[in-house]
Image (cartoon, rainbow, N blue to C red):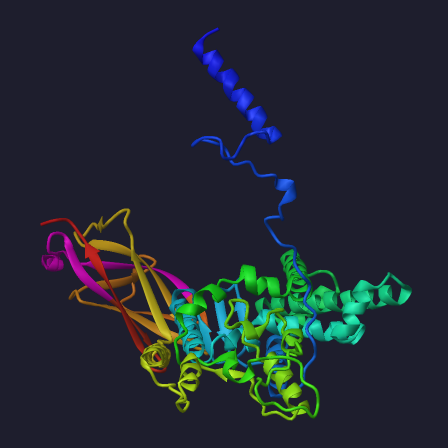
Amino acid sequence: MTNAALNLDALAAQAANIAAGDVDAHAGEEAVHVIDWQSHSPLYESRVKVYPKLVHGIYRRAKWLIMLVTLSIYYGTPWIRWERGAGLPDQAVLLDFPNRRFYFFFIEIWPQEFYYITGLLILAALGLFLVTSVAGRAWCGYACPQTVWTDLFIYVERLFEGDRSARIRLDRGPWTVSKLLRKAGKHAVWLAVGLLTGGAWVFYFGDAPTLARQLLEFNAPVVAYAFIAVFTLTTYSFGGIVREQVCIYMCPWPRIQGAMFDESTFLVSYKEDRGEQRGAHKKGTSWEGRGDCIDCGQCVAACPMGIDIRNGMQMECIQCALCIDACDEIMDRVERPRGLIGYDTNDNQERRRRGEAERFNLIRPRTIVYGAALLLVSGIMLFALLNRPLIELGVLRDRNPLFVVLSDGSIRNGYSLKVINKDYAAHVFRISTAGIDGAHLMLSAQDAGEVDVEVGPDTLKDLRLFVSVPRDRLSVLKNGEASLRFVVTAVDTGRKVESTTSFRGPVQ
């Protein structure tokens, strides 16, 4: 038997011993550490369902109000009408993909103006950075769609199953007719909310009344039903089933937010200097020698993320401030001052430990930079919008052939023009040329001098034009090329737009 065969046999025997768990983990420098996987905990912990308790207070009322406003905007916006003129859509907010337009009240964006969308995204990012640097994850806690719809789904859940304790008892109890009806009713409403969410979304891409009628008559485009199905499923899953897992595992923002915080950022915090030592408290006993926290756990019960704010700042915390309302309720009952949990800064926590007065520093380098960038981009966007041209002209010169020599010795070039009328009224535009003396503009190969064309409201007109230069004017060509300008003027308003191209001819 060869040495190679012996080595293979030895490796096989070693593998068998490893599989059987017979290898000594401390035998020699090259010993193998064997893990008995069945005796260890799983690599991934199963989700522990969170049952948020209903609390009452200023932050809970603020969240109700924001939820009402944001949901009203989302569901109601497609039904707002905005008159633009005959033949144009009257929906205030519309993504008109067939005609390649985005309508937002008095603003209309064409495909070549996508930089406006880019500007809006930059503004949104800078605004989010500024808010986060001042008040932490306020967006996540109050206005994020995941938070808003989860709040709505929890509200529906409470209607059918009761508050936290009742929901826990219901889930732990046996299946009865009552439990089955409650669960079925809850999930049916969740699906209805998801269906309405998907339905509202597709209304942004077509005329809402028309599309709603088509959906009810089952003759709407297939893509509309597909999008509604997808949004129904995702809304139902994210708001009803997955909930806080979206924020913890799917959203990247919790992992980015730390770069936006500093020592002066307002964060929902437990005031350890006031709350410790924590412990149960009996009515009538002294508060001397102990903290205000009675360790009731109501802050944990109210948290939709299922965390304990007393453990300090955590990635899972969305800064919804419901733990503040829960703690304030308890403080009122035990006749202690409110604010044991509240918006606080790391700087003030350290200052209280040193016995110094608190201070609030909203204006600091970080907020100045974000605020200045926000104002700068806003100014650029506003300037671009106010100076947005209502007429645009695109010119494309023929490349094959580059030029044509006519019988009289003159040179002719062909051009394709696109005249865009962004106004909501039709206009007659006069097209002329400039830059080459003696150039003749021709329409359909006939000498026309100047060309008048009518372009309808909010439309684009394609034109095929020719320009010829007489033989005695060809001296303007330098190396067979000269600059040529097309000028388009609105006859009624005098608005003018130019586009520079080239005129080609033989090299002299």
Whether residue 282 is visible to the viewer of this picture, yes or no, is yes
In this view, 71 is above or below 447: below
State the image coordinates of residue 201 (x, y, percent, origin top left).
61, 68
Regarding residue 89, the answer to whether it shows in the image is no
Residue sitting at x 65%, y 41%: 38
Front one among 448 and 252: 252
Q: Residue 176: which quarter of the image?
A: bottom right
Residue at 46%, 81% in the rendered image: 266
Q: Which residues are magenta?
A: 461-485
**Nearest to the observer: residue 340 or residue 442:** 340
> Is 1 located above or below residue 450 in the figure?
above
Q: Is residue 103 left or right of residue 358?
A: right
**Residue 60 location, x and y as percent?**
63, 83
Residue at left offset 42%, top offset 73%: 120
Q: Is residue 474 magenta?
A: yes
Say whether residue 430 is magenta. Answer: no
- In percent of width and height, residue 246 lies at 58, 62
On screen, residue 267 versus residue 197, left or right, reads left
